[in-house]
Image: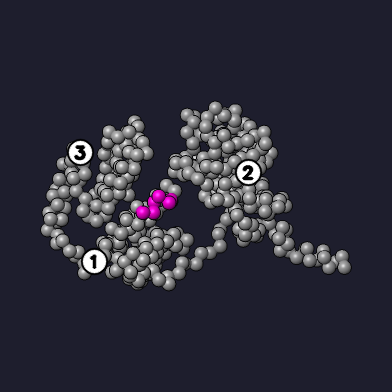
Amino acid sequence: MGSIRARDQRLFFDFRYQGVRCREQTLLKDTKLNRARLEKIMSDIDKAIHLDQFVYCDFFPDSIRCAAFEVIDAETKQRLEQRPEHLTFASNLPTFAEFSYEWLSENEVHWKQSHLANVKSIFENYLLPIFGHLPLDQITREDILKLRTSLAKGKTASQRSITNDRVNHIMTPLRCVFSEAALRFDIPSPFHNIKPLKIGRSNIEPFSLIEVRTFLAGVRADFRNYYTVRFFSGMRTAEIDGLRWKYVDLPNRQIVIEQTLVNGRPETPKTQASYRVIQISEPVYQALLHQHDETGHYEFVFCNEVGNPLDHRNVTKRVWNPTLAMLGLKRRRPYQTRHTTATLWLAAGENPEWIAKQLGHSTTKMLFEVYSRYVPNLTRQDGSAFNSLISCN
């Protein structure tokens, strides 16, 4: 799906059509009102493209690209003129594509930008190519089950299987669309009684304390403070990406989580429990003191030489993965630093309720379901607590 972007403080359309990336500049300044206006037009463009009804010169009559799409525009206009007024399908209901765009426009006001982008991506890559042209009442339960199976087995256009968890996430907006359609048009939902796929236990691979020390000793000096904070604070990637100095209270040794950064955009924390105050340990305190000497005059704690926040994907590619390889450590996702914090706190005997609050969990449930198996002495899985009890009586 297309997007509205800015260049030299002027907004422009950025989308793909017929395999070509199209960027159409406007004279509008980058304001919230102008963005809202253009987002509506961009939504119409996306809808027209997916319905095979897009005529380039109708939207951008002064564009130099009109000549390149002249033949396609003419064919599209001719096809639309010859199309009968009534639907080609024997249905009075809108197509899945038409209703999906309506559903998205009605719900996007409730979502974060990152979630909206993810939902739009699901429709564009998985749902619209299969169901877009079909009226709502012609999509069956069998069709949905076939799509789910093809996703899980990699029999889609990408020919790549995906996890059950990801399949469930793709199915969620599909279920929501049909639930709304069932209410609005008084039709049965084909999604009835389709249960989510089972998801296995989360596979986490925390670092040992020796591995943490090895990594911090071997990583580039200009990223040592960054990874020290990651390993010993339990912050999520978006939280450390969006960490600003105004949220760091060094005298009281606290970090306040009030804002995150997702795809370069400031957003609210993941959940209500994610709004929290993290107590700064000694290694984190020393790292932040040193970091303040480097970036204290900028807004973001961890940033590049001009003060812009780090791109975690770039950091992973250029710093994290090469360091693991150089030190002979097992390759793991950077998010494992958060899991490492949790297991080290548990192994040290910290109060589980305190740990849960530090991590931004509403309860201790996840601690004992996910992390406790890495610290058997804490949960007494070896039976030593019972042996000690009976030996004293």
Question: Which residue, given by chain and number where applicable, does mark 2 sit on?
Answer: 278
* Mark 3–mark 2 CB contact (< 8 Å): no
Q: Which residue is drawn at 39% across and 51% down?
A: 108
Q: Which of marks 1 and 3 is in front?
A: 1
Image quadrant assignment for residue 186: bottom left
Among numbered discs 3 and 2, the one appearing first in the sequence: 3
Amino acid type at circle 2 is Ile
Mark-to-mark CA distance, 3 and 2? 53 Å
Q: Compare marks 1 and 2 and give the one earlier in the sequence.
A: 1
Residue 201 in picture, x, y percent from top left: 56, 62
Residue 151 visible in the displayed image:
no
Quick check: marks 1 and 3 in contact, CB under 8 Å? no
Task: Identify the residue under disc 1.
Answer: 92
Question: Badge 1: few (under 14), some or many (20 or more) residues near its Cα, within 10 Å?
Answer: few
Q: Which marked residue is nearer to the observer: mark 1 or mark 2? A: 1
What is the x, y in percent for residue 91?
23, 68
Label located before the other in sequence (1 or 3): 3
Could you tell me how far apart the alpha carbons at marks 1 and 2 are, in whole angstroms? 56 Å
Disc 3: which residue: 63
Cα gap from disc 1 to disc 3, whole angstroms: 37 Å
Q: Quadrant of residue 246?
A: top right
Name which quarter of the figure residue 50 lies in: bottom left
Looking at the rendered structure, the secondary structure element under dot 1 is loop
